[in-house]
């Protein structure tokens, strides 16, 4: 989950800073109306009906000192004393709505400070249980506070409802408010609604001359990722790299280049990180070596693999040894490729790599080693063509003049339809070679040079 830190740090009051101190400034009189002269004048100018006067209550004189004590204890974080005074105040039989709202507000803050969010939510909702006598500013702000608490409880749909209700009361919502609504939409997987709110929140922040918060840029980046819009995601990640330089954002940028089929830039990004010693994991080195292979630079790939294996960063497993051998082979370092290929073959579940190893030995006329590798390939199985492997095995035996073994191997190969004819020809060739050798090794008969005398004519 993306942590945008909408909720203040634990141990601090959720609304103490924004609401409690401000609300305690006026404790003496009951305000009868909340309609300003300027609002009336503007409404008359636009020929619109003026808003009906609203009776707004305030803390009465007899309770002012108690509330002042509550406020002081609250500011000094003496929660036990606050609770005692609130209990005393709650016992009063004739509390008006604003006094009840203050009590609920304080209780909610204390619950929040002790990380008891269900309790905090219950108390804050008491403030909005009635509009009668509650100032609009106080009431509306509590809607936003409730939305924040619900969000922290991962109740995103309900949080969004409160936030949207609050939004309607604001002429110019803050950047944080747009971000709260945007993330709620995001968590509900409504990315189309999340996007404009997050964009607006970031834009408002930039208008103030501030660098967008890291979490906000992360959220915008994640929305574009969910929408598979990597072109628009790229400049957001570039901002993260610029303002909050971290390896993870460099890797993310490399991944975006990959999604945009821009492997050259991805390779350059990974090479730069490698040169600075930032690539420190097995998967990161494998990615760079694979990129080098795709960019027709197998020798550099082989050197990356060698260094990684020697240093212990790369795991000595099938994947590493196979890629290392492939890089060496592509770089035409055939002899050097045999060692890692043999290790990879030993780790593989099937005999395909042993078959490849055997073919490599054959190419180097190393018949005995080729015979061993191909035998292991057949024993492991899982080959694309066992018949063709048998043909190769018979060849290694033939070249070692193991004619009986070769003939038996080619006889086995005859069982495979695709190579049956080839195997038959090999059997004839082996037989012919055996006969030829026997003829060469046969003793030469001596010629009788004695000449009988000619009979007398």
Image (tube, grey):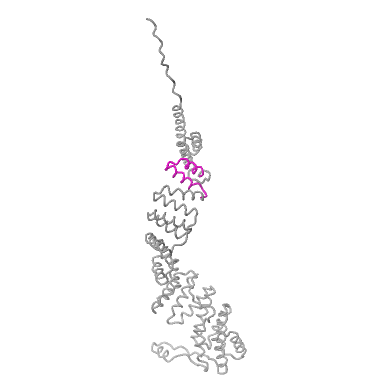
Q: Is residue 120 left or right of residue 327?
A: right
Q: Residue furthest top?
A: 457
The residue positioned 45% from the left and 76% from the top of the image is: 178
Q: Give the magenta part as a residue range.
A: 348-376
350 falls in the magenta region: yes
Give the residue at x 37% y 59%: 264
Q: Quadrant of residue 104?
A: bottom right
Q: For residue 284, which quarter of the picture?
A: bottom left
Q: Is residue 40 above or below residue 317?
A: below
**What secondary structure is the magenta-colored segment mainly?**
helix
- Residue 186 point in image, percent of width and height: 47, 70
Q: Quadrant of the C terminus?
A: top left
Determine if the magenta segment contains residue 45: no
* Image location of residue 394, percent across then percent down: 47, 38
Q: Nearer the viewer, residue 48 or 357?
A: 357
x and y, in percent, of residue 138 in the image: 50, 85
Q: Position of residue 128 (x, y in %)?
A: 54, 83
Foreground residue among 144 and 315: 315
Q: Is residue 140 above or below residue 331?
A: below
Q: Please, is residue 389 above or below residue 32 in the view?
A: above
Give the total of numbered labels.
Answer: 0
């Amino acid at each position: 989950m993306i942590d945008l830190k909408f909720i203040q740090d634990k141990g601090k009051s959720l609304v103490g800073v924004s609401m409690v101190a401000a609300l305690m400034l006026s404790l003496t009189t009951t305000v009868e109306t909340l309609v300003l002269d300027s609002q009336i004048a503007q409404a008359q100018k636009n020929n619109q009906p003026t808003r009906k006067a609203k009776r707004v209550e305030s803390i009465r004189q007899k309770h002012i000192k108690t509330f002042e004590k509550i406020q002081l204890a609250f500011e000094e974080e003496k929660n036990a004393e606050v609770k005692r005074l609130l209990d005393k105040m709650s016992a009063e039989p004739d509390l008006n709505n604003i006094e009840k709202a203050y009590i609920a507000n304080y209780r909610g803050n204390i619950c929040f400070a002790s990380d008891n969010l269900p309790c905090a939510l219950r108390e804050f909702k008491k403030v909005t249980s009635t509009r009668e006598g509650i100032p609009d500013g106080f009431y509306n702000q509590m809607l936003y506070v409730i939305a924040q608490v619900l969000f922290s409880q991962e109740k995103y749909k309900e949080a969004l409802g409160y936030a949207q209700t609050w939004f309607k009361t604001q002429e110019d919502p803050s950047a944080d408010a747009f971000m709260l609504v945007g993330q709620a939409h995001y968590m509900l997987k409504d990315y189309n609604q999340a996007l404009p709110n997050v964009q607006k929140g970031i834009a408002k922040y930039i208008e103030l001359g501030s660098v967008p918060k890291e979490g906000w840029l992360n959220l915008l980046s994640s929305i574009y990722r969910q929408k598979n819009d990597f072109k628009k995601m790229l400049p957001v990640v570039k901002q993260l790299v610029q303002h909050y330089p971290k390896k993870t954002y460099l890797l993310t940028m490399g991944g975006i280049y990959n999604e945009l089929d821009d492997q050259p830039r991805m390779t350059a990004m990974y090479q730069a990180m490698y040169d600075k010693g930032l690539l420190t994991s097995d998967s990161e080195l494998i990615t760079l070596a694979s990129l080098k292979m795709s960019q027709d630079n197998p020798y550099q790939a082989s050197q990356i693999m060698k260094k990684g294996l020697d240093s212990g960063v790369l795991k000595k497993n099938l994947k590493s040894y196979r890629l290392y051998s492939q890089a060496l082979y592509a770089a035409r370092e055939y002899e050097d490729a045999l060692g890692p290929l043999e290790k990879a073959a030993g780790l593989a579940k099937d005999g395909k790599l042993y078959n490849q190893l055997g073919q490599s030995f054959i190419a180097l006329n190393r018949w005995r080693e080729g015979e061993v590798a191909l035998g292991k390939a057949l024993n492991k199985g899982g080959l694309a063509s066992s018949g063709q492997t048998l043909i190769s095995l018979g060849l290694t035996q033939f070249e070692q003049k193991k004619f009986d073994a070769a003939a038996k191997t080619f006889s086995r190969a005859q069982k495979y339809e695709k190579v049956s004819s080839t195997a038959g020809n090999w059997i004839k060739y082996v037989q012919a070679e055996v006969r030829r050798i026997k003829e060469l090794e046969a003793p030469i008969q001596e010629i009788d040079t004695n000449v009988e005398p000619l009979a007398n004519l």
